[in-house]
Amino acid sequence: MPVHVSIHDVSPAWEREVELALEAAHAHGVRPALLVVPDFHARAALLDHPRYCERLRELQAEGHEIYLHGYYHRARTEGGAGALGRARHAFAQKVVSGGEAEFSDVSPEEALQRLDDGERMLRDAGLAISGFVAPAWSMPGWVLALLAERGYAYTEDHLRVYDPAGKRSRTSLVLNYASRTPGRLLSSVAWCRIARPARRVLPARIAIHPADMKFALLRAEIESLLGWADGDFVETGAALLS
C-alpha cells in the first residue's frame, strides 16, 4: 500500500531540525509534504523571515506540497464550559498533545479567522496551499465542512485521510513519534514497530516532527521507517485516497 511522508511544524522556529528531517527524507528519494505553521507559538511569524520563505518556495518548486498547519500551533489555556468541556480540553491538550491542539476547541468563528489569516500569510509568502492539517490531528467534525467550502481537497486526522471538497475519506495508518517524556518516546517507538504490518491493508503516513531530530534513537527509527517504505512512496496526500 502507498506511503506518504510529511514534516510537521515547519517554521523558522525549527529551521535546523526541519533541514535535518529533509536530509533524511531526501536520502530515500522522498519529497515530504511540509506542514507550515504561519506563526509558531506566536513567536515566529513567517513573513518576518524572508530567507525562510524563500527556502520554502524553493522546496515547493522542487515538488514538496505545502499544507497549512493551524495558525499558532498552540491552544488556549482554559477549557470549555462545563465538566465535559473541561474534560475534552484536558484530553486534547494533555494527552493528545502538549497544549498544541489548536483547532480542538476553537469556535467556528475562530476557525474561520485562523484559516483566513493562515491562508493569507502563506500566500503572501509566495506559497500555494495543497491541504490543511490541524495541529495534533485534532479538530471537530464541523471543520471538514469549513474546509470543503473553501475548496480544500486534502486533510487528515489520526485515523483517516479526507478530500473535504469531494466528500471522500479513507482509513489510514499513521506512524509518528512522541518525545515529550521518556515513556511517550519509548511507547511511540514500540507502536511504530508493531503497527507496520497494517500497511498490507491500509495506506500509511510517516509523520516526522522537528523535535524527533533531537533524539538519536528517533533519528534511527525514522531512518528505519523510511527504509521500510522504500519503493511505495507517494508524493501527494491525495494519492492516499486513490
Image: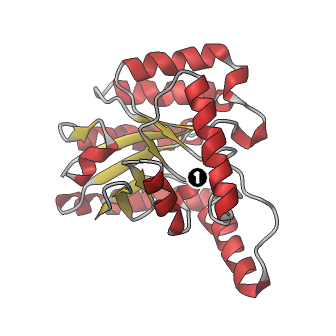
What is the quadrant of residue 210 in the picture? top right
Q: Mark 1: few, some, or many residues within 10 Å (few <14, many ≥20)?
A: many
Decide: is 106 above or below 2.
below
Residue 33: x and y in percent read: 41, 36
* Residue positioned 78% across, 85% down in the render: 82
Q: Horizontal placement of 223 versus 214: left or right?
A: left
Q: Amino acid at mark 1?
A: Pro
Residue 90 in view in this figure: yes
Compared to 184, does 79 lie above or below?
A: below
Is 17 left, or right, of 90 in this rendering? left
Location of residue 183 (image quadrant): bottom right
Dot 1 lies on which element? helix
Q: Which residue is mark 1?
A: 135
Above or below residue 221? Residue 121 is above
Residue nearest the viewer, comparing 194 with 200: 200
Give the residue furthest to the front: 149
Residue that protrudes farthest toward the right in the picture:
78
Q: How is the image coloured?
A: secondary structure
x 41%, y 44%: residue: 221
**Left or right of 95, for residue 149:** left
Instruction: Identify which residue is drawn at 70% across, 45% down.
Output: 72
Q: Residue 216: x, y in percent?
A: 52, 38
Is any atom of residue 102 visible in this view? no
Locate residue 227 relative to residue 22 in the image: left or right: left
Nearest to the observer: residue 203 or residue 36: 36
- 167 vs 2: above or below: below
The percent position of residue 207, horizontal first and vertical second, equals 44, 46
